[in-house]
């Protein structure tokens, strides 16, 4: 049982590395396609404008619940919209629901834009539940406001290198522990043989 557990444990770094790489690939694919990355029913979105002040400040990083069942009038949602010919994610409040389509408006905006009207449910990313961070948003804004692709690839590379080094370290520790157990076993066997010889004498 102990050996079986150690064998399973020896594969864990590779399993964790594989999961990490899959998550990174999903993140990269989402960002490359202008989508908000979603993991385990949650998504993180950056709010660059003042349209939702004072509820959400410019530069805040917010957590979105993507596993919602229903949206209601008054909910703050993140959704995809075509703005000036570009597909972007927006975070605004629902002010009207007409069947399966929604109208939104920024709390701090005086007007409703055309792209805020007739938003289908398919374009809604998720619902904002109140979790936000100006600190993380500030770091994100400073890092990714320019040269995004280069920085993103650099972060992925660093993360993968760390994971590989950690996996190697864990495997090394397991092997050292295994060698230690084998040495102890040999010593115990040698002691047992000496006892047997002493008893025979």
Image (cartoon, rainbow, N blue to C red):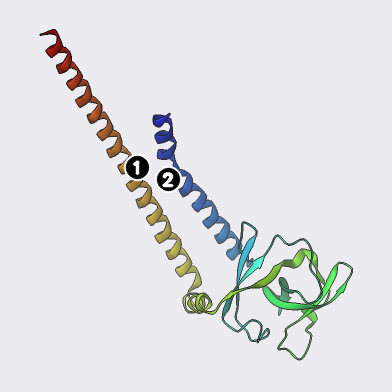
- Number of marks in picture: 2
State left or right for residue 21 relative to residue 50. left
Circle 2 crowding by C-alpha within 10 Å: few under 14, some 14–19, many from 20: some
Quick one: which residue is furthest to the bottom in this view?
110
- Residue name at image x 72 percent, y 85 percent: 107
The quadrant where residue 103 appears = bottom right
Q: Is residue 26 above or below residue 149?
A: above
Q: Position of residue 96 (x, y in %)?
A: 85, 77
Q: Position of residue 42 (x, y in %)?
A: 63, 62
Disc 1 designates what residue? 171
Circle 1 crowding by C-alpha within 10 Å: few under 14, some 14–19, many from 20: some
Q: Position of residue 161 (x, y in %)?
A: 38, 55
Q: Is residue 31 above or below residue 54?
A: above
State left or right for residue 71 relative to residue 201. right
Image quarter (top left, top right, bottom left or bottom right) of the C terminus: top left
- Residue name at image x 46 percent, y 64 percent: 153
Disc 2 designates what residue? 13
Look at the numbered disc 1 and give the secondary structure of its residue: helix
Q: Earlier in the sequence, mark 2 or mark 1?
A: 2
Image quarter (top left, top right, bottom left or bottom right) of the N terminus: top left
Q: Is residue 171 above or below residue 141?
A: above
For the residues labelled 2 and 1, say whether their Cβ atoms are less than 8 Å apart. Answer: yes
The quadrant where residue 67 appears = bottom right
Look at the numbered disc 2 and give the secondary structure of its residue: helix
Q: CA distance from mark 2 to mark 1?
A: 8 Å
Q: Which is nearer the eye, 65 or 1?
A: 1
Q: Which is nearer the eye, 104 or 85?
A: 104
- Residue name at image x 60 percent, y 84 percent: 58
As drawn, the label of residue 12 is none
């Amino acid at each position: 049982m102990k050996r079986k557990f150690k064998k399973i444990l020896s594969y864990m770094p590779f399993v964790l590395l594989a999961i990490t790489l899959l998550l990174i690939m999903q993140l990269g694919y989402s960002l490359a396609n202008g989508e908000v990355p979603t993991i385990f029913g949650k998504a993180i979105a950056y709010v660059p404008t003042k349209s939702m002040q004072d509820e959400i400040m410019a530069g805040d990083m917010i957590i979105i619940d993507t596993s919602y069942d229903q949206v209601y009038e008054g909910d703050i949602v993140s959704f995809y919209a075509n703005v000036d010919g570009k597909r972007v994610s927006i975070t605004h409040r629902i002010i009207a629901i007409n069947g399966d389509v929604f109208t939104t408006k920024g709390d701090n905006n005086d007007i409703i834009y055309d792209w805020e009207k007739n938003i289908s449910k398919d374009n809604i990313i998720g619902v904002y539940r109140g979790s936000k961070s100006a600190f993380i948003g500030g770091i994100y804004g400073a890092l990714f406001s320019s040269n995004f692709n280069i920085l993103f690839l650099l972060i992925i590379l660093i993360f993968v290198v760390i994971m590989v080094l950690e996996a190697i370290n864990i495997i090394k520790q397991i092997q050292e522990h295994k060698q230690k157990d084998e040495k102890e076993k040999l010593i115990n066997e040698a002691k047992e043989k000496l006892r047997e010889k002493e008893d025979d004498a």
